[in-house]
Structure formats: structure tokens, C-alpha cells
Image (spheres, helix red, strand yellow):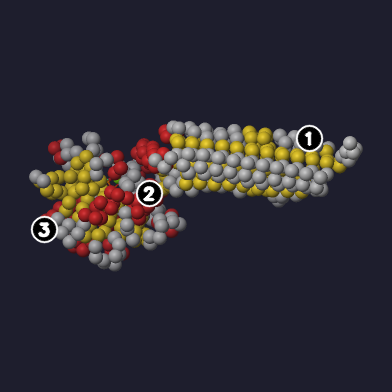
Amino acid sequence: MSARAIVLAAGKGTRMKSARPKVLHELCGRPMLWYVLEAVRKAGVGEIVVVANEELDPYLAGFAAPGAVPMRTVVQEPQLGTGHAVQVALEALPASQGALLIAYGDMPLVPAATYRRVLNAVDANVALALTTARMPLPSNFGRIVMRGPKLERIIEARDCTPEELEIDEMNAGIYSYDEASLRGVIGRLSNDNVQGEFYLTDTVELLIGSGKRVIPLLEPDYRVVLGINDRIELAAAAAQMNLRLCEAHMNEGVTIVDPATTYLEPELTLAADVVIEPNTRIGGRSKVGPRSVIGPNSRITASTIGTDVRICESIVTESVVGDYSSVGPFAHFRAGTELGTGVHIGNFVEIKNATLAADVKAGHLTYLGDTAVGRAANIGAGTITCNFDGTNKNRTEIGEGAFIGSNSSLVAPVQIGDGALIGAGSVVTHNVPDGERVAGNPAKPLPKKAPA
Ligand code: UD1
Ligand code: MG
């Protein structure tokens, strides 16, 4: 049977000074708890119990369990300390054999490998493996007290003597217990300490006292075990996570001109030879195809960008951009924009819920909403689809190869036929048949061209 995990997330997080539960604060587009659950799952855990408080609990119902790992929530109310949180979780969890991982929900930077390391260290002879890290002082972390080469106990910073505060090996807050051994001591915790809390860390002394083996495992990079307690630490963790995401993509062949001003989220698919120019944000499970150049100053959210696309100084949300298209500067694609191959969209063009077939051009100052545009149509500067009549949103259809003259208003619902021509400055209130030429306000058919 695969290991189980308890993730503690019931603390009040008062130092965030927020109405929102601490573990739901986001870095790089995901709540901090999301990263913890993801890393725990990747470490090979088969079932996760999250200990929540009453405020957090309702949010967790909609919190997608990562992968296929079953997740459930136990409410700890009131919060009497980390040891109490584990007592509450164990009461709700049928007893089982084997390793039980315990993680804190406010440590989003911990990689799966660190969890895996403690999990793998627990066997018939080891009742508890825990992660430690050497850190610069001063620090609020619990101190690892050794007696010679052997771990003796963990003392919380607030319970330390001045000498003990000089210890620079810290308790990271990552534990793997032999579950039966943990159940044997969890009821014996006391709250006789400065904070008046039941400390999970006191299980160390209790296990050692009952003849069990507890082993510390040193994590070489202390930065990955830093928790988040306030907004300053949140920003620092976000910068570290962002750099990690950038480096992962750079290692796969993406050029990131300036990682310090590139903001990525997890779950992106960026092909080799994508180039990201500075001051650009890409998020929400977006995909970008080979050799596309994104940025500078762009924001791509939940979108699919094809091959050899150029997006410059533009905003693209929930949209699809076909291969060889060019976008911007200063274009804005709202949800439901779909560009075919080789489309050109220039500056100050807003598009929403619209499909533009291959080779369409809209170079300047245009609004296309609730619209379908046929292949190779040319949309002149200042063209507006008047899609809203005050009550309803109406559709505009523009045929293949149509030519819309500059500064035209297409009053929807309206259809412009294939190859039709709309003269500059027209207000089109009626459908225009294929090949027809109209102009004026309201637009009227133009005389047929005299045969040459
Ligand atoms: C804890 C450790 C400390 C370690 C540090 C690492 C204890 C007693 N101390 O201290 O040794 O160096 O983490 O970051 O464990 N929580 C609950 N219920 C509670 C109290 C806390 O679920 O009643 C949760 C919190 O939401 C948090 C985690 O447990 O996710 C840790 O609690 P926190 O109060 O942040 O402990 P620290 O003081 O940081
Ligand atoms: Mg903490």
C-alpha cells in the first residue's frame, strides 16, 4: 500500500492580516497549498488528509485534488497546536501500517524529492525521519538538539534558552512516521510550554524515550524549506518559485531574456526555441508552439499559441492563435478569440468571441466581437462590429476575401458576403450579398463598375 499524508493547514495565519485563509494565498498563479499537495503526490503518496479550520474548509471542497490522489479534509477547531492537529487527523483516519508523511501547508517550495527522502527512510527500525536544515541566525524555527551524534529533541524557538538559540540546525517541519509508533505517543503530548500548545515536535523526545529510532536528514538548501508567515515571505517565495519555473523551461530550450521580469505559472507547455521577452506573464495552462516570440510587455492566459507566432505588447486571454500569425503591439484578445493560420492583427485591435480564418488582416484600431471572419478578408482601420443593441449581443459574419473600408460600423446582426466591398466610413445596417459594393450612412449599393 502506498504511503498516506497529513497536511496541516488549520493555523490562523494571523501575520498575513487577511480575510483569506493563509494557505490560499497565491504565488505564481496557484495557492500555496496547491504546491504542497502536488509535491506530496509526486513523492508517491496515495491518500491525503488536509487538516483545515472552519474558514478554509469550504474552499477545499472545490479544491481539485492533484492527479488521482484521494483527498479529504478534517476540521480542527479550535487550533491547539501542530500535535493537536495530528491527533484530530489520526482520529478521523482508520489505522494503517507503514509510513505516514506529515507536511505543513505553508511550505510551497519543498520539492517532491525532499518528501520522498523522509518517506524512504522509514522502515521497521526507524520510527521517524525528519528533515533538518542549517540556517542563518536569528531564526524562529525549532532547534535540533543533539547529544553527541544523536538527536535528542526539538525545542521551539520561543522555549529556547539563549544558548539553545545559537543552534543553527533547524526543524524544517517535514516528517515521515511509522504510523503505529506515532499513534503510540500522540496521546501523550503536553501543552506545558510558552505557547500553551500541543507540539508535534515533542513526539521526537517521546519516541526516543520509548526506545525508538528517530533520524534527522539534512536538506542542503535551506531556502526550499522556508515557510510563509507574512506577505514579505510570500513575495520572496514567489520570486524563488518563479525562477525555478523559468529555469525548468530554459533547461528545455526556451529563451527567457529576463527571468526577473518574466512571470510564469506551473502547468505551461512551452516548446523548444520559444522566446519570452521581458515583462511578460504567461499563465493558466497556456501552450506556446515552437519558435514563437512572446513579449515584451505581454500577458497570455489560458491560451494556445501556435508555431512561429509573434505576439508583441499584447494581452491574450482564453484564446487560440494560429501558426505564423502576428499580433500587436497593443492588441487585446478577450475570451473566445480564435485566429487561423497567418492572421495579422495590429495595434489597438480588440477581439472577443470571434473566429478569424487564415490570412485575415486587421491592422489598426478595430473592435471585432461575436464575429466570424472568412479567409483573407481585410478589415480596415477603425472598423467596429456594433454587436450590442442595448439588450442583446448580435453576430456579424464577414465573408471570404471581403474588404471592409476604414472607419466602417457593421451594425449586427449583419452578414457581409464573400468578396463584398464596404466603402470607407459606411454604416452597414443590412446584409450585403456576395460581391456587392456598398457605401454611405446608411450604406447603399454603389453603381456597378462599367465594363473596361
Ligand atoms: C513549526 C514547528 C517548528 C518548525 C517550523 C517550520 C511545531 C510545534 N513547530 O513551527 O519546529 O521549525 O514549523 O516551519 O510544529 N497548524 C495546524 N493546527 C494548529 C497549528 C498549526 O494545522 O493548531 C498548521 C499551520 O496551518 C501550519 C503548520 O501547522 O501550516 C505549522 O504551524 P505554525 O504555527 O506555522 O508552526 P511554526 O511556529 O512555524
Ligand atoms: Mg510556520
Residue in the image at 56% along x and 40% along y: 309
- Classify the position of ligand 2 by quadrant: top left, top right, bottom left or bottom right: top left
Per the image, the residue denoted by label 2 is 35
Q: Amino acid at mark 3?
A: Gly
Image position, residue 176 (x, y; %): 24, 55
In this picture, residue 103 sits left or right of residue 70: left
Q: Position of residue 201 (x, y in %)?
A: 21, 51
First along the sequence among labels 1 and 2: 2
Helix, strand or loop under label 3: loop
Q: Secondary structure at mark 1?
A: loop
Residue drawn 42% across and 34% down? 259
At x 19%, y 38%, the residue is: 168
Secondary structure beneath label 2: helix
Which numbered mark, 1 or 2, is in the foreground of this view?
1
Calculate the distance from the C-alpha at mark 3 to the C-alpha at mark 1: 90 Å
Q: Nearer the viewer, residue 68 or 62?
A: 68
Of label 3 and label 1, which has the lower sequence position?
Answer: 3
Distance between the Cα atoms at labels 3 and 2?
36 Å
Between disc 3 and disc 1, the foreground one is 1
Whether 47 is drawn above or below 249: the answer is below
**Which x, y percent locates residue 56?**
40, 53
Callout 1 touching callout 2 (CB < 8 Å): no
User: Where's residue 196, x and y in %?
Assistant: 23, 50
Residue underneath mark 3: 211
Quick check: can you spot residue 340?
yes
Question: Which residue is drawn at the image coordinates 23% and 38% (left, top)?
Answer: 135
